[in-house]
Amino acid sequence: MERRVAHWKHLDEPERDLLGEYTGELIRSKNWEAARGFALTEEMRLLIAAQAALLILGLSFEHYREVGAIIVHPTTVVLTGERGSSVPGLMTDAPMPILGEAAHKGPILIAWDAVAMDVHHPERGHNVVFHEFAHKIDMLDDVVDGTPPMARSEIDRWVQVCTAEYERAQLGGDDLLDSYAGVNTGEFFAVATEVFFDRPVEMAEQKPDLYDVLSGFYRQDPAARVTGTPR
C-alpha cells in the first residue's frame, strides 16, 4: 500500500493499522469474482479493498454489511437492455458505458483499468471505488437518496447543505464537482465523496459547508491530513 496507494502517505500509524485491518477483512469476507475470464490478482484485490477501507476509517466495518460480491471487469462495461434513465419515470435501452455499478441488494461492479488510474492520481477527483462503495453506504437504509444513515441531529444541516450543492450541480457542475453529481441525489453523494477524499483541500476552500457535513458524517478530516492543519 505504501508503494501503490497515494493516500497512504497522509495517514498516521493508527489509521494505517486500521486501514490494514479493514482491507484484510474486505479481502477475506467478501466474494471476489473476475468477469470475462479476467485474471484477478491478490494485488488487485488489495488495491480495491484498501481504497474502500479508507471511506470507513471513521465509521465501522459494519457499514459494508450489504457488500456481498465484488465483480472486477478488465475495462469499461457497456450496459444494455431497458432500464431507468436519468430522468425520473422514463426508461431507456440505449447502450451505456460504465466504470462501475453498485446494485441495491446486489454486487458491486468495478472496471480494473479505472482503479489502476484512480489509485495513482487523486488530483483528478475521480475514484470509481470511492463512488461505488459510497453508494453501498447510502443504500444501508434501503433508500438511495444521497442521505446515508446518520444521527438525527445531523440530518437537517446535511439536507440543507447538500440540497443547495445538488441544485448547483444540476445547473452543469463546476470545476470541483463533476456534472454527473446533478443526475440525482444518490449520484451527488457518491461524486461528492470522491472529491472529499481525493481533493479535500480544494473542497474545504471552495465548498466549506459541504466539506464540513461530509467530514461530520465520515468522521474524518482528510484536508488536515494533507495540510497538517485541522479545521
Image (cartoon, rainbow, N blue to C red):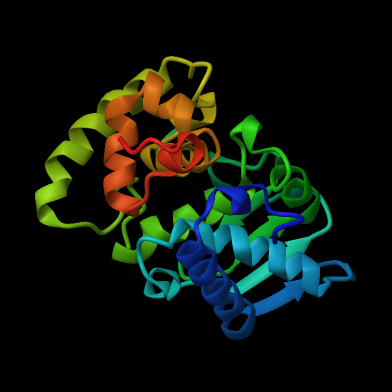
Would residue 47 appear left or right of 40 to someone viewing this image? left
Q: Quadrant of the N terminus?
A: bottom right
Picture residue at 72% right of the left edge, 51% below the top: 115
Q: Residue at 15% x, 48% y: name it.
A: 154
Q: Is residue 30 above or below residue 157?
A: below
218 or 180: which is nearer to us?
A: 218
- Asked whether 226 or 182 is in front, the reply is 226
Furthest-left residue in this view = 153
User: In which quadrant of the rendered image does the C terminus lie?
Assistant: top left
Please give the name of the residue rendered at 29% of the width and 51% of the height, measured from the top-left corner: 217
Q: Quadrant of residue 94?
A: top right
Q: Which residue does the image show at 55% across and 80% down from the upper left?
A: 25
Q: Position of residue 61 (x, y in %)?
A: 42, 73
Quarter of the rendering containing residue 170: top left
In the shown orientation, is residue 114 left or right of residue 184? right
| Closer-to-camera residue (223/98) | 223
- Examine the rendering and report whether any part of residue 168 can be seen: yes
Q: Nearer the viewer, residue 3 or 54?
A: 3
Q: Where does the image place residue 191, in percent across and percent down from the top left?
A: 49, 38
